[in-house]
Amino acid sequence: MRTKTIDILLGILAGLTLICCTPKDETEKKIDALIGKMTLHEKVGQMNQLSGGAWLTESAAKGEVGSILNCVDPAEINAVQRAAVEESRLGIPILVSRDVIHGFRTMFPLPIGLAATFDPALVEQGAAIAAKEAVSSGVRWTFSPMLDIARDPRWGRVAEGSGEDPYLDAVMGEAMVKGYQSNGLAACVKHFVGYGAAEGGRDYNSTGITERSLRNVYFPAFKKAIDAGAMTLMTSFNDNDGIPSTGNRWLLTDILRDEWGFSGMVVTDWNSSGEMVAHGFAKDLKDATDISINAGVDMDMMSYGFISFVEELVKEGKIKESRIDEAVRNILRLKFDLGLFDNPYVDENGVQAYSAEALAAAEKAATESAILLKNDGVLPLKKGKTVLVTGPLADAPYEQLGTWAFDGEKDHTVTPLSSLRETFDVIYEPGLSFSRDDSSAGIAKARAAASRAEAVVVVVGEEAILSGEAHSLSDLNLQGAQSELISAMKSTGKPVIVVVMAGRPLTIERDLENCGAMLYCFHPGTMGGPAIAKLLGGDEVPSGKTPMTFLHTAGEAPFYYNHNNTGRPNTGTETLLKDIPIEAGQTSLGCVSYYLDSGYGPLFPFGFGLSYTTFEYRNISIDKTRYGTDDTIKIEFDLQNTGDFDATEVAQVYVRDLVGSVARPVKELKRFERVSLKAGETKHISIDLPVEELAFWNVRMEFAVEEGDFQLWVAGNSAEGEPVNFTVE
Ligand code: BGC
């Protein structure tokens, strides 16, 4: 019998044989050879990213820039590539990047709108189309997807992400990474990490997220995207617990590299290395460079610190050249993997945009992203009716594209006004010239015009500039005189349909009271017009669901469905509360907190959205009452379309772990499925949920499923349904 020692020795020998005899990957050999030839100055050049185009040819020829951003002109891109490849000493191609956030030319709905579709296959298709268009212009790297969990609609960048839920965020992030990379556009997951939790929703602000919350809430989407092959990652601007992400070695090395095994490239956000000086975390740009590189950053976006100070820092022994080699290796690997060494050029006559496939997918996404928040029966509108179309966003082709629509073109955008004209007999009177317009003259004209119409469609919301980076708001009501426009329409006695196009969930409670129906579209992109016209006319049926909780007032933020419970029921204070009913389902969750002036629940819970039909969930069951940690929960239910329209419902599965070694959220989304049903049809749905997906970072900071009692809901939103009980043992 072999002894244990012999076994161990044999094991070590086998391991060594494997290391020595496995041929080194061809690419790695090429990278090593190239690094062997590079001067330190050339290495640092690769780590330098600059904004611009043809005027950077000199830097490219000197090997002083590794990547450019914000150039989308194929001729300019080729000029920079020529300088890098044909004139620089080592001929290393440039990596051309751009913020392709929700489409390149063909603009899809904002990412928050894409999240509202709950349709990852469509989101993946959209990302693949964006990649095709961007790559045809010479762009090979996008700074997307943004995976920041956003629980505060005051933060302008909620527009760019998938909202408040870690699971939905992870599913959508993975879909985008796959879509982009399937067509040769490297993805960049950002902003690592916690950027969306900025204090008060003020952009760039500090965060104070504990390690457990990072791991349970903010990390999962990044981990999933990395497991799906995301090639790059961007650090965030915020300091968390005093440490700016760009200088956080625990985050960028211990977690990202050592724990998750990320082998891609890490880039700073725009000057986020330099900004560590303003944070009071680095004494000057040189110190910031030292801190960033030693934390694990590979490439510097626009601080100029790396190109200015790395050589000195290496000479002074503050940065090891091996760390520089590692960074350069990550950058060169990306360039090899993208095929840039084989062909760095773009076909200047091959630009692709607005294909029939792209427009159809953009329209489908705009259709699926629209959330019906209210309908007293006015929708769908009968075709051919005389309709007054009013509101500042009814015919605003640039504004409906939303934030980060750099390359979208208003001339290719189809507005609701132009599409409604194809279906209805339209009278158009804008009422207000833009969302912040607070004049009343136009409102009076619209009011007069309403007397000639059978119904009124008011398209309101935010211009593109009101959401996005550095565009936080403290007041989330409709701006200008938009609410006055809606109430003026209501006073005409005509049925009023409000369509909202915005970059965030606005506080639209009073506007809801003044309309018969409200369709919430976020910024729907190039094909918003036909999508909205078909939805209003009943050719399509709304199926979008809220990816963020909708609030009564901005003062309620942050407010999210997957919160922990409080310890106190609200006894004795009900008489002080406004007459707002406790949300369905909230009572079963025990103690919920409240505001004296706005009540218990949100305006609309996460996952909410109406249809022109109704759905019934029946016979919800799970296959056992007791599960082992290796088991899979088999969830079954019947879903019936009980109304008159063929439609799609997003069925959602939520779970609660009743008692944990740390308190657990009152509900967590674990699965969802879009189910299409003909009028009257019933489908039997089965969903598998492995028990291991109930794991979380526990009191010992271990990722584990804890034994005990759980509840599970299947419903059409996060506030409905009756729990099914089970135990994990
Ligand atoms: C933003 C990033 C963006 C970068 C490049 C920064 O200001 O925070 O999200 O990718 O600029 O445009």
Image (spheres, rainbow, N blue to C red):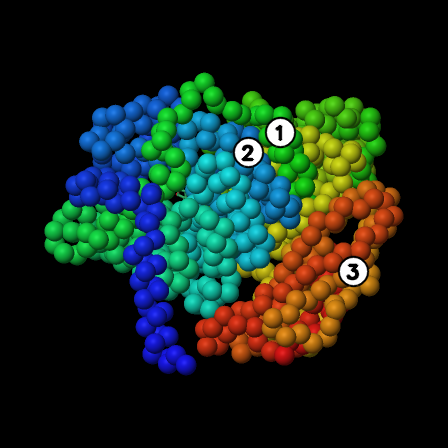
Residue at the disc numbered 3: 637
Q: Residue type at mark 3: give it.
A: Phe
Q: Where is residue 661 in the image (x, y as percent from the top left)?
A: 53, 78
Question: Is disc 3 placed on a helix, strand or loop?
Answer: strand
Q: For mark 3, does the 10 Å Cα neighbourhood hold few (<14), some (14 to 19), or many (20 or more) residues?
A: some
| Residue 467, placed above or below residue 295 | above
Residue found 62% across the figure and 44% down from its top? 121
Residue at the disc numbered 1: 357
| Residue 589, placed above or below residue 327 | below
- Sequence-wise, the earlier of marks 2 and 1 is 2
Label 3 close to label 2 by CB (< 8 Å): no
Q: Position of residue 382 (x, y in %)?
A: 83, 32
Q: Which of 535 and 503 is in front in this view?
A: 535
List the single residue furthest toward the top. 349
Label 2 close to label 1 by CB (< 8 Å): yes
Residue found 48% across the figure and 77% down from its top? 699
Q: For mark 2, does the 10 Å Cα neighbourhood hold few (<14), some (14 to 19), or many (20 or more) residues?
A: many
As measured in the structure, the alpha-carbon distance from the residue carrying label 2 to the one carrying label 1 is 8 Å
Q: Residue type at mark 2: give it.
A: Ile
Residue at the disc numbered 2: 129
